[in-house]
Image: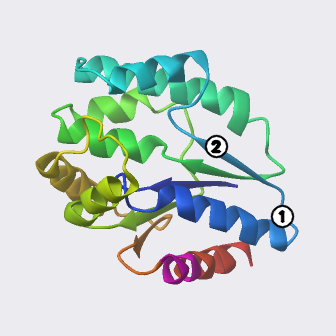
Amino acid sequence: MLITFEGIDGSGKSTQKRILKKYLESTGKKVILTEEPTNNPIGQEVKKLLKKDAYTWVEAILFAADRALHYEETIKNNKHRIIICDRYKHSTYAYQSAMGLDKKWLTCLNSQVPEPDLTIYLDVTPETAIKRIHHRGIKAIKYEELELLRKVRKNYLSYKSKTFKIINSEKSIKEVAIDIQKIINAIIK
């Protein structure tokens, strides 16, 4: 099973993926945590680009290449485990289309990797996300601008799918974790 966490930075993805892993392991499940961009050679190039201005379409291609390698080397080969991935296809669609790229082109570019079995979108306002990022003392990257985050959030909220679940992440960490566990329990049963 492939579970992906999506949301703007500061929405709680990293925290909630670790909590979900611990919860699932307590029920006897085997779990792998992973993230995009990855630490493979392509993912390392993507991370370098995030620190400077680059052409949006070049970034989109590199994100797709990183994702393809990630799928082939990590996701596809672990079919007997639950894989929890911090960011996946929806991030590309939300961010790169907010930056002006065509959604159909982005979909085509990422069409060879499968859809996740479940996507958990942690929804916070861009204002809350920026406060959380600044509170952590982390230097903002180019994607963490208020107007862009508003467009990204709007893109995320436009998804309509049975496997795309929206969680209010303005709540406490514990409340969000409980909401996620309810969704997971309904699916795993």
Q: Secondary structure at mark 1?
A: loop
- Which scheme is used to colour this image of the protein? rainbow
The mark nearer the N terminus, 1 or 2, is 1
Q: Quadrant of residue 18?
A: bottom right
The image shows a total of numbered marks equal to 2
Q: Which residues are magenta?
A: 173-178
* Amino acid type, callout 2: Thr
Number of residues whose C-alpha sits closer than 10 Å to that of mark 2, classed few (under 14), some (14–19) or many (20 or more): some
Local SS, label 2: strand
Task: Name the residue that disc number 2 marks.
Answer: 34
Where residue 129 appears, x then y in whole percent? 29, 60
Rendered view: 151 above or below 55: below
Q: Residue at x 33, y 42 (%)?
A: 93
Is 20 placed left or right of 107 in the picture?
Answer: right
- From the top left corner, tell me how far across and down residue 150 is, in percent: 17, 55
**Which quarter shows the N terminus?**
bottom right
Q: Which residue appears farthest toward the left when viewing the image?
A: 147
Main SS, magenta residues:
helix
Is 49 on the left-hand or right-hand side of 79? left
Residue that carries the numbered disc 1 in the rendered image: 29
Looking at the picture, tell me which residue is in the foreground, 77 or 56.
56
